[in-house]
Image: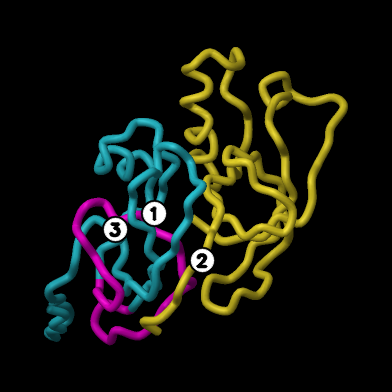
Chain colours: A yellow, B cyan
Amino acid sequence: MKLARVCGRVFCSAQEASVEDKKLLLIQPLDWDTGKENGSPLVAADCVGAGSGEKIFFVASREAIVAFQNCYEAGCGTTLPPVDAAIVGIVDGYQVEGL
Amino acid sequence: MFVAKVVGSVWATRKHPDLKGSKLLLVKPVEPITGAYAGATALAVDGGVGAGVGDTVLVLDEGGSARKVLKIDNAPVRTLICGVLDSVHSGGKDKKYA
């Protein structure tokens, strides 16, 4: 799981039905050690209610879909959303001390 | 799985419901014999081994297995600490961690 900062929001007028009720945020991955930007921004689906400028952690690849499995099993949507990054937590603080 | 050192911890109040109560730690991959850092820091969930900052640990980096260890089917977890290293033996050399 990786650290990132929310830097924007993405809106689509036409999209896959199962993504329609998801909030899509633009996130900039950051380095855990230095807090500096690490790589290009990407679009992630939000499942915790993150807002602009907040530091978050996200899961990528297959695990992103797993984050929405509960919601799907509870009956929202007919298929799992096709996402490859999901925001799964808002970072209140972190400490790197053992380096 | 890879060998890493626990270098920090993360606190997050608002997180995915299936991550509630899990300990979030920062791990940095190390060379098993020399102990030198060898990669980027990642966030890992403690899979019940009680790892702490400074420990050298065994880290699992595969979602399916991680969820099996946690016994939570829908936990969005990929990186999981599944062991604390005592020692490594490789190429005729020994490295003790505990």
Magenta extent: B31-56
Q: Which residue is mark 2?
A: A93
Residue that appears at 54% across and 39% down: A64
Find numbered disc 2 in the image and state the secondary structure of the residue it sits on: strand
Q: Amino acid at mark 3?
A: Ile
Q: Do the CB atoms of the residues marked 1 and 2 lie less than 8 Å apart?
A: no
Are the two marked residues, 3 and 2, in contact with CB atoms closer than 8 angstroms? no
Q: Is residue B54 shown in magenta?
A: yes
Main secondary structure found in the magenta portion: loop
User: Mark 3 — residue?
Assistant: B81
User: Within the image, what quadrant is residue B77 found in?
Assistant: top left
Is residue A48 shown in magenta? Answer: no
Q: Position of residue B4 (x, y in %)?
A: 32, 71
Label 1 marks a residue whose chain is B
Asked if residue A87 lies left or right of residue A99, the reply is right
Q: What residue sits 32% from the left and 74% below the top?
A: B5
Image check: B78 left or right of A32?
left
Is A67 in front, or is B14?
Answer: B14
On the image, numbered disc 1 is attached to which residue?
B79
